[in-house]
């Protein structure tokens, strides 16, 4: 039996743990090779205050409005917590009645919702300076109503007059001009040199799958282009390692099952084709003169600790890809590196060692290229700002 116990160090520790747990349910984004520290460092450098489970930007205002309403209640702290939860549940219905068909947090779970919007956005609210209070959500509601003025940023727009005023009220995602201006100001104040801030000022929202495909990339400042360049190289490079990992596991499972008609043999063919396509579509020159030391220095400026063994794995994989010109599918050195990496991280639970763990595997782990929260999260946020004018 295994379990996770909450160790109450501080809010930052809890937020980091939450982000790790969020990835467990997303097979195509699971971090089987220990790449998360670099991925999250680059995402934070480009898009501070965001996370993979955010949906729409107006939640950055919904949550403070709800906590202001609950915090103004003159009852006990327990009563204020109950009111805050009730209002967050009411927000679900209000957004659905207002026409929200997507991006409504809790639209399926409703009153059974465990991961409330405040939990999803709490860390980002602090990063962007919307929340001044340093503690957690429960502690925020322990502040007496008369002392609550400094919990939120000055200039926080007021909630609409009818916001969650009745059980049949409505709410919508579009930002007002004032609300968009406030959030742009927060970004400019707290993250003036980030790509997120730059994009928040644009008059149009680009429709691209990856941030390095953005049509305005050539016009960005050199420091931003440098970070985006690291992101593109890292995503493309490590996508190959992830595909090889999935191929190797599928081969092992197919060998164990024996039958030539098994789904595992189909996966072997699929991953082989995907790896060949990756090699063909990834320019070999992309990794020439890539300054990984600069990437490690940038990561040190974030909360994410890139361990030395992770650096060695990434550097060695880069060298193998350069030496083989991307033809890693049958390369014994590439295969040994991926196997050793997963075995080091998982130990006795390694799917290369543990046949039971392999047979419980879904057949796809980490197969999606890293996009560093750009789509749909940040792309949605930027579009919300652009639409507000």
Image (cartoon, rainbow, N blue to C red):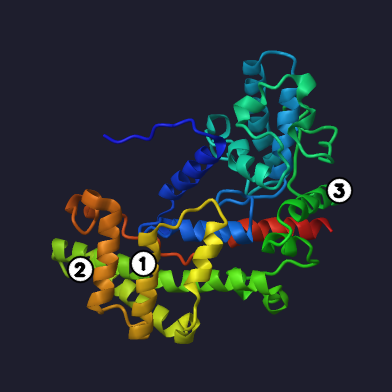
Which of the pair 257/129 is nearer the observer?
129
Q: Is residue 204 left or right of residue 239?
A: right
Which of the pair 345/62 is nearer the observer?
345
Q: Residues within 10 Å of mark 1 (few under 14, many from 20)?
A: few
Q: Give me the residue at 66% from left, 42% from top.
A: 126
Element type where label 3 sits in the image: helix
> Residue 286 appears at what percent x and percent y?
49, 82
Circle nearer the viewer, 1 or 3? 1
Q: Is residue 64 left or right of residue 7?
A: right
Q: Give me the residue at 76% from left, 50% from top.
A: 186
Circle nearer the viewer, 2 or 3? 3
Q: Earlier in the sequence, mark 2 or mark 1?
A: 2
> Residue 232 appears at what percent x and percent y?
53, 72
Q: Give me the residue at 51% from left, 38% from top.
A: 14
Residue that badge 3 annotates: 178
Residue that badge 1 annotates: 312
> Residue 194 appears at what percent x and percent y?
68, 61
Q: Earlier in the sequence, mark 2 or mark 3?
A: 3
Which of the pair 112/60 is nearer the observer?
60
Query: In the displayed structure, would residue 288 be above or below residue 54?
Result: below
Residue that badge 2 annotates: 261
């Amino acid at each position: 039996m295994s379990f996770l116990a909450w160790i109450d160090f501080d809010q930052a520790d809890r937020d980091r743990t939450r982000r790790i747990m969020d990835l467990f349910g997303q097979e195509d984004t699971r971090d089987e090779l220990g790449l998360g520290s670099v991925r999250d460092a680059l995402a934070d450098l480009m898009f501070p205050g965001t996370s993979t489970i955010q949906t729409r930007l107006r939640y950055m205002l919904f949550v403070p409005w709800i906590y202001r309403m609950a915090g103004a209640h003159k009852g006990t702290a327990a009563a204020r917590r109950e009111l805050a939860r009730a209002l967050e549940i009411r927000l679900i219905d209000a957004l659905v009645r207002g026409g929200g068909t997507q991006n409504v947090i809790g639209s399926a779970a409703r009153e059974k919702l465990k991961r409330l919007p405040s939990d999803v956005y709490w860390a980002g609210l602090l990063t962007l300076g919307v929340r001044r209070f340093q503690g957690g959500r429960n502690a925020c509601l322990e502040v007496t109503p008369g002392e609550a003025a400094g919990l939120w940023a000055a200039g926080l727009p007021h909630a609409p007059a009818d916001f969650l005023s009745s059980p049949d009220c409505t709410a919508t995602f579009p930002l007002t001009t004032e609300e968009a201006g406030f959030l742009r100001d927060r970004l400019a104040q707290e993250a003036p040199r980030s790509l997120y801030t730059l994009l928040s000022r644009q008059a149009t929202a680009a429709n691209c799958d990856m941030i390095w495909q953005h049509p305005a990339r050539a016009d960005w400042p050199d420091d931003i282009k440098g970070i985006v360049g690291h992101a593109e190289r890292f995503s493309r490079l490590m996508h190959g390692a992830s595909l090889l990992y999935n191929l190797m596991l599928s081969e092992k499972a197919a060998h164990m099952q024996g039958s030539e008609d098994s789904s595992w043999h189909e996966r072997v063919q699929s991953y082989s084709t995907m790896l060949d396509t990756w090699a063909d579509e990834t320019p070999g020159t992309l990794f020439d003169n890539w300054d990984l030391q600069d990437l490690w220095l940038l990561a040190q400026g974030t909360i994410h600790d890139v361990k030395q063994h992770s650096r060695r794995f990434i550097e060695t994989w880069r060298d193998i890809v350069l030496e083989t010109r991307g033809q890693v599918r049958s390369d014994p050195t590439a295969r040994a590196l991926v196997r050793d990496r997963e075995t080091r991280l998982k130990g006795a639970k390694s799917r290369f060692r543990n046949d039971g763990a392999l047979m419980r595997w879904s057949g796809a782990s980490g197969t999606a290229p890293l996009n560093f929260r750009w789509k749909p999260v940040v792309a949605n946020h930027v579009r919300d700002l652009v639409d507000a004018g």
